[in-house]
Image (cartoon, coloured by chain):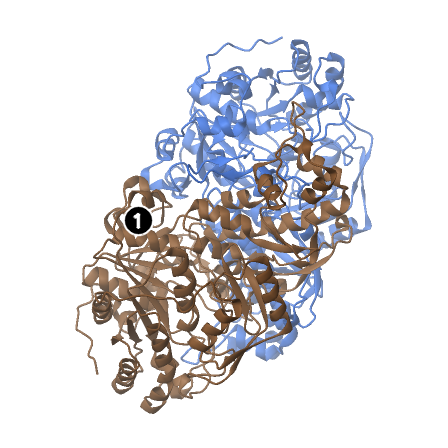
Chain colours: A brown, B blue
Amino acid sequence: MATTTEVKPLLPVKDPVPADIDIAQSIKPKHISQIAEVGLGLLPDEYELYGPTKAKVKLSVKDRLKDAPNGKYVVVGGISPTPLGEGKSTTTVGLCQALGAYLNKKVLTCIRQPSQGPTFGIKGGAAGGGYSQVIPMEELNLHLTGDIHAISAANNLLAAAIDARMFHEAAQKDDALFRRLCPADKSGKRRFAAVMLGRLQRLGIDKTDPDELTPEEVSRFVRLDIDPDAVMWRRVVDINDRFLRGISVGQGPEERGMERKTGFDISVASEIMAVLALASDLSDMRQRLGRMVVAADRQGRPVTADDLGVGGALTVMLKDAIEPTIMQTLEATPVLVHAGPFANIAHGNSSVIADQIGLKLVGPDGYVVTEAGFGADIGLEKFMNIKCRASGLAPDAAVIVATVRALKMHGGGPPVVAGTPLPHAYLSPDVDLVTAGCANLARHIENTRKYEVPVVVAINAFASDSKEELEAVRSAALAAGASAAVVTRHHALGGAGAVDLAQAVVAACSGGGGFKYLYDAELPIKDKIEAIACGTYGASGVSYSPEAEAAIAKFSAMGFDKLPICMAKTQYSFSHDATLKGAPSGYVLPIRDVRASVGAGFLYPLVGNMMTMPGLPTRPCFYDIDIDPETGRILGLS
Amino acid sequence: MATTTEVKPLLPVKDPVPADIDIAQSIKPKHISQIAEVGLGLLPDEYELYGPTKAKVKLSVKDRLKDAPNGKYVVVGGISPTPLGEGKSTTTVGLCQALGAYLNKKVLTCIRQPSQGPTFGIKGGAAGGGYSQVIPMEELNLHLTGDIHAISAANNLLAAAIDARMFHEAAQKDDALFRRLCPADKSGKRRFAAVMLGRLQRLGIDKTDPDELTPEEVSRFVRLDIDPDAVMWRRVVDINDRFLRGISVGQGPEERGMERKTGFDISVASEIMAVLALASDLSDMRQRLGRMVVAADRQGRPVTADDLGVGGALTVMLKDAIEPTIMQTLEATPVLVHAGPFANIAHGNSSVIADQIGLKLVGPDGYVVTEAGFGADIGLEKFMNIKCRASGLAPDAAVIVATVRALKMHGGGPPVVAGTPLPHAYLSPDVDLVTAGCANLARHIENTRKYEVPVVVAINAFASDSKEELEAVRSAALAAGASAAVVTRHHALGGAGAVDLAQAVVAACSGGGGFKYLYDAELPIKDKIEAIACGTYGASGVSYSPEAEAAIAKFSAMGFDKLPICMAKTQYSFSHDATLKGAPSGYVLPIRDVRASVGAGFLYPLVGNMMTMPGLPTRPCFYDIDIDPETGRILGLS
């Protein structure tokens, strides 16, 4: 097998590996200004401190470095995971610690901000693990610099604006609505707010003086005429609150019986989160927020945030959120945390802005390593076809993280269930089981090669893995077209355990090479869906429900058919069926419905039922979480 | 009349006074580290920057200064206001600008963090106005340092925990619940989480080993047995979302029909906000959060946050929120912004912690000026009897803000309605109308004198007020027992316009003098309610609905009867009826119901229907709010 290069860890590693929070709290972080200025090369006025361990990057750095050459761009994806996760974040962090602290490369880790839902629910935090973590993990897993809260607030202001508008339109005649929407100022003059001029334009009313509108034009202007049954916008909360999945609003005595069924999603599922992740600057974000389609009117026409007059306010609420947050790894390499779109109904990648800034900051000899959520069939596919299309960037290499545990599951091992002990098959060597499961890894490699990007497989080793099992994975990976496959022990050793992986990534990035998308965004909607289904998932075809057919026809008529596709599919299988492990093929992928995130800029076909609001278990993580009032030390976060 | 001392403004004042945001954006704030270190005397490790204009005070400063003498403590209240507000925040800020920038006193302004609801809804922001503002007003009125968001998240985690617990208890037998709540670790050993030991103690079960509980004890331990009709905890959102006032939750297909009616309040109405405002340190906050009563069980017994296991997690979510935020006025005097409890169902004052820290920081020759919400019958009464009781502090002087406009309304002027032009009576001199209205001011002065605190009346002058009107108010104030009554023009002139007021406050504070509460907290609940109703509101008696009688009996039986009283009453009248202007007397105050905020530490009788969730008008403020993408300048905030 490939032996791990023996490198002496710089961290005071212990065996067995202590709890994540104990490791994280044992390392004193450097002052973040040192990370910002020395690690990232920011000027003192290009970042703002949020305490000593967090800072936000000002977007002015983009202007300063607009002509600078980019560094190498590495995306980290994974095989189809078990519910326990295969250490993709941990590998991303460990790889960067190796690149920065051992190979002395300029390096930047780009990750998503985790939702607080899992922190207090089942899964725990998302800072990596063991000796490969982003610190302080308490900050990363809690409010950080408030971006998700800003998104929740913006999302919910928009939701309130929709219901309030329906309420006021129902209660008022055209002239009363118009009088209130365009009131006279002290001089008696009426004027349109700036945002109203856009609506007039969309309505084809070429006037700027309210007094010049005809009664018919007034009516068209003031009546959004939202169909209560066609409101697509839901409220959000960054908490696992299952009882908000399906609710009725408007039951207060003052709401005149305008009751309506709706629900809450978790905040990271908000389209606004996807907008933040895909916007390239403030102006682009303003445009995207304004054109988000939140409902249809009674004629079936789209109603946007700017029709409600709220796009500007949403942008103002996100004025700080658009700036990535600087943190650091345990080995003091820099990290940008930014955005955190759901990897399911959204695209599951950190922000375009963070990656763009990072590639300039690390320079041509440096590396930006960015993580793509879920398995490579989801997060990495969306990275290539949605995020890279939005950013204009192309990766120099892709890393696919694999574990013996997950490959055994794909080879036919018993189900892996969170919160229950691992079955015996996963704790004792079984080369045949692993080898059988490598079909899953092989397909992820082959899929990724279609983008003409070199693939490095990171075999994230656990203490229970045998040499023979690890070697079996390595051989299979190389056979499937990986340019390298490397065992990595960053969880136990920090960057020292990922030096081989780092060297393989450096080698892969040196190859030059091309990049191409899986599909042309100009193709009809169904062609794009089929390109992904057949070209990535191994399906033999696609079936569409009547709802999906109707939605495709509707979006095509609305002109939204040129948007890329963001499949909402289980991460546990290439297929729509989470129980189909390995590399299933010859099945027909069913599309239940198709929805649009017009501001974010994608259509999302629903493959099965998607859960957009997790629940709390009988004993949530929060039972163990507390604070020592004497020291302020946080206890029990994981 | 009292002439205003002619002091040359240090600010470049213009006439007419420009829009608030234009003034605010025309003054470049000092770097907040200068305010923190020079203005407040903090050491470099006693604050944390949140960008260049905001910082948070570390609570360690309390320890360093615990033996230092306190400064002078001034509370600002107001007469019963019109819906337009009488400039209480503006006066608070202007007074501090005068004390600091003109009289060279050490001074600190303590104000509440404004809700974002009004910022985007009807009222606009809450940074003061004209040349007396806290800057940057964009920061104050938006997310600030995230405290309200942290409160919303904590409030809603608790709400999710309640519904999830009811769900899991309904679906599982005792032993399954117990197995999940106290799972075996890797060694097979079961243990109670620390927070569970408190519940065992409350249940009288003197055991610490899960395996030693009898089946009967297991059942009592695992079953909170929450009565779905007796859940008192509601969810919150910091948005004016009227359609969330009354909702049904649990309508999703996975929730097994456990539908329940509930609703959302605006975040500042959360008990957690009141807890933050009344806690004196981290340990006190932890205890208060844990003992919040969120529901009753089917036997009518209280169920607390710690019974749900979530008190520690709530504290962790508020670990940054407990630190006050440093900002500055237009004339670079320091401000602490902290907490923002509703002045209605809660006590409407900024935090105990900010005031306590501030009094140490300004030292014996300095001044802390803290604002109390609504009219003095509400915010100031609660300041005296709830906040001072929690903090152990006593004010040296009280300022009552009055305007000619509001006094005319109390004297019989036509209704003042937000968003419609002011009637003529308010724009032309009418001394008789003003004089008739001074009964309202007189009663507020007399009420405040009952605390043995000297009263300074600040007559907040508008351009349309005549000399004779202002003099009439001054005479009436002095006749009613004010130690001074001063015309103040801080809106037009900044601190220069409030120098006379500042001198009057300095003089009032030099008198020594006593302090006493209006009532003894040990009295029975009804005696305390009647002390406020008759001693402050001018009622001749109090009537109780059957619900109120039952609640009083219940809370007395539960041992919550020693808590102070936080009346939930309209701010527009001394009475329960908003249309009764002036100084009504001889009426019976009806108590509709009584509720408890056990963690915050008060009972709140409901006098009429209280609105805890505002709505959006037809044309909310957000229509004008946008951002210039080139400069990042925020437009249209007011």
Q: Position of residue A630 (x, y in %)?
A: 40, 52
Q: Is disc 1 placed on a helix, strand or loop?
A: helix
- Say if residue B568 shows up in the picture: no
In the figure, is residue A356 to the left or right of A529? left
Q: Is residue B401 above or below residue B336?
A: above
Quadrant into which the C terminus of chain A falls: bottom left
Quadrant into which the N terminus of chain A falls: bottom left
At a point 79% along the width and 30% down the height, the residue shown is B580
| Chain under disc 1 | A
| Nearer to the camera, A276 or B238 | A276
In the figure, is residue B66 to the left or right of A93? right
Q: Is residue A599 above or below residue A539?
A: above
Q: Position of residue B591 (x, y in %)?
A: 77, 43
- Disc 1 marks a residue whose amino acid type is Ile
Number of residue marks: 1
- Say if residue A389 shows up in the picture: yes
| Nearer to the camera, B231 or A171 | A171
Q: Position of residue A332 (x, y in %)?
A: 26, 56
In the figure, is residue A443 to the left or right of B397? left
In the figure, is residue B120 to the left or right of A123? right
Q: Position of residue B38 (x, y in %)?
A: 35, 29
Q: Quadrant of residue B326?
A: top left
Q: Which residue position holds label 1?
A: A32
